[in-house]
Image (cartoon, rainbow, N blue to C red):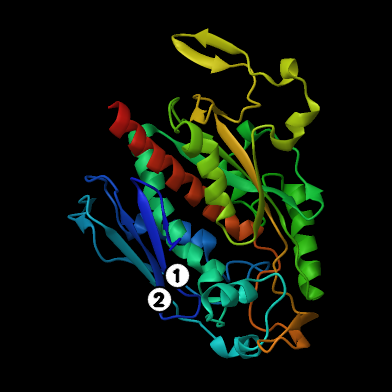
Amino acid sequence: MGNTFGHMFRTTTWGESHGGSIGVVIDGCPPGLELSENDIQPELDRRRPGQSKIASPRKETDTVHIHSGLFEGKTTGTPICMMVMNTDARPEAYSEMSKKFRPSHADFTYTMKYGIRNWQGGGRASARETIGRVAAGAVAKKFLAQRFGIDILAYVRQIHKIIVEIDPEQVNREIVESNIARCPEPNKADEMISVIERVRSEGNSVGGVIECLTRGAPAGLGEPVFDKLEADLAKAMLSLPATKGFEIGSGFSGVTMTGAEHNDPFRSKNGRVYTESNFSGGVQGGISNGQPIFFRVAFKPVATIMREQKTVDTDLRNTTITAKGRHDPCVVPRAVPIVEAMTALVLADHALRWKAQCG
């Protein structure tokens, strides 16, 4: 249970961090979409470990193979299965964790739920599971771009106490990808990198915030009541490893404003309705209003740190643990393509639901 996301564009991920392979099955992708591994690989390259000095040093090429759902370079409408081999797994580094629970990790809760857990790298709780999400998101991105003209861009807004104040509308992909922090402000990016390097040297970790902007989404995406667009976006983001917060538009800062200040006035120009401000974040009543959709996601500090910590073992005895293995001191820069992928999966699903319902 809990391994499938979406209604009409359905994504099921499978595999473990230190198993033989990991991947995804997409069911519901419309037929006729031109697709190849070359559409998927660049997104996986943005997510993979070992890509920079501030990422996990695990060496994986994360080379994707599409095993079904294509004929003559186009989707057939049948399930698309994609797989990535794990080539640099080192399960022996996690032997101490077979009997001890890492603080603030999923070790204890998985044991309480299932009575068994894969302790090698965290199993399904590992962020390596997101390979399947990113691969599926690449397909969703291409579908949204070709059929609806939708573009999705995420970037790092904050690392620890370093915050970038920037107009989302002024951000472009080139500047985001120009530095390993994936921050759109170069000077702040250097500060972020320094902080991440420092905490790594101390055996510690930090968190941060990713902001995501969607341009070109039409008015009408989303469902009333339980399947509101922002509700599905929140679920998508909070399903990611290490996430602890979600806010859309003005978010929590909106509580400091009055209704007169916060309302987005409607105007009409050249037959198109737009709003003069966008405190709603592009969503009103759970349905997109045609304005850019933007939100923020908070990521906690990585739970696995290279310091001795208090814990208990599987016999419920008090003890300590010092983690080993290869881990990110900050997951936020590598999480940027994952946030984009989950956004694409939500929007692709709602786009298909909208077309099915309204024609």
How many marks can you see? 2
Residue for point 55% across, 87% down: 91
Image-quadrant location for residue 103: bottom right
Does 18 sit above or below residue 299? below
Q: Amino acid at mark 2?
A: Ser
**Residue at which label 1 appears:** 62
Amino acid under label 1? Asp
Q: Position of residue 231 (x, y in %)?
A: 54, 40
Q: Is residue 130 left or right of residue 181?
A: left
Could you give the CA–CA distance between mark 1 and mark 2, rounded to whole angstroms?
10 Å
- Is residue 262 among what the camera can see? yes
Q: Which residue is mark 2?
A: 21
On screen, 238 above or below 93? above
Mark 2: give few (<14), some (14-19) or many (20+) Cα within 10 Å.
Answer: some
Disc 1 and disc 2 in contact, CB within 8 angstroms:
no
Image coordinates for residue 227, horizontal then vertical, percent: 47, 38
Q: Residues within 10 Å of mark 1 (few under 14, many from 20)?
A: many
Q: Quadrant of the C terminus?
A: top left
Q: Position of residue 336 (x, y in %)?
A: 58, 53
Q: Is residue 108 above or below residue 300?
A: below
